[in-house]
Image (spheres, rainbow, N blue to C red):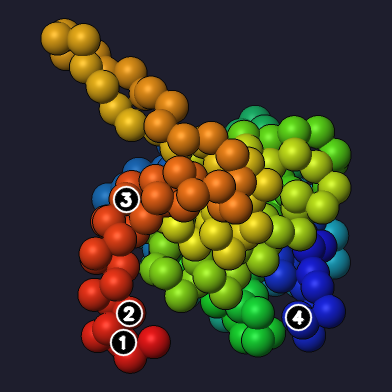
Amino acid sequence: MPKTEKHEQPYVVVDNEPFSDTSPLVEALRQWVDSRSVSDEVVHAVCDFAAKDLTDMALAGQGVAGLIGRIEANGVPTGLELTARAAESLVQRVTPRRRAELEAIRPEDVATVTLFRKDGSRAGTLTEGLSVGQRCTAILALALATGVDPIVIDQPEDEIDNEFIYTELVPLLRRAKERRQVIVATHNPNLPVNGDAELICALTASSNGTSRSRGQVAALGSLDRRPVRERVELIMEGSKEAFERRRAKYGF
């Protein structure tokens, strides 16, 4: 997984839980049972109860089918909260033929992608705790983890605050460009300036009188060239005056 010496652990961690996605079993039961007798909560409870003692979740379909067979033969087992009406509906609607179909369902693996900050603290996962921008950053880290081919990235700073851009996204891109060509379209000066961009192409939008506008190259080169620095100031910093005012207010 992507990591640096400044991270106490990898930047992004992917954990895989084999055969843990029981949603196909839930969907199958939902199609067959009467929703008035068997609620969604009961369907989930049945699937969870059937899977709790399994050592191989690949057999989850067989576990659900077997549980319904047990209910038919011996009644509702201890620990499963199921009304008599719901139990009857399950047994009647999930026929032996449908139980065979359940046994053939193979649950999919579930991958959990966790993003960590530079200080090693946990930011969240793709499904919990991360903003849209942070989720995109986690996916970008995975995309950059391997390979040496050139890659084009469009506005990776979207939906991310400037602190996260500077502390997390910029180092990620700096590491990536050591072994591959990274081409980034951005409006944020942190990426080309602090990311040590080797070539900056500053574009301005122009219109030919139609509703369509085209980008025109206003400056091209490295930050060593004054025209490039001026365009970075104008387009990304809001002008040299805006930059100077921020510097004065912050006391830099």
Q: Which residue is mark 3?
A: 234
Q: CA distance from mark 2 to mark 1?
A: 5 Å
Closer to the chain start, of discs 4 and 1, is: 4
Question: Is any atom of residue 250 visible in this view?
Answer: yes
Which comes before the other along the chain, label 3 or label 4? 4
Residue at x 33% of width, y 91% of height: 251
Q: Which residue is mark 2?
A: 247
**Amino acid, disc 2:** Arg
198 in relation to 20, above or below: above
- Residue at 33% from the left image edge and 18% from the top image edge: 214
Which secondary structure lies at badge 3? helix
Residue 112 place in picture, x, y as percent: 66, 62
211 vs 114, nearest the viewer: 211
Tell me which amino acid carries mark 1.
Answer: Tyr
Answer with mark 2 or mark 3, whichever residue precedes in sequence.
3
Q: Earlier in the sequence, mark 3 or mark 1?
A: 3
Q: Secondary structure at mark 4?
A: loop
Residue 132 seen in the figure: no
**Which amino acid type is marked by label 4?**
His
Identify the disc placed on residue 7.
4
Quarter of the image with the C terminus in it = bottom left
Residue at mark 2 to residue at mark 3: CA–CA distance: 15 Å
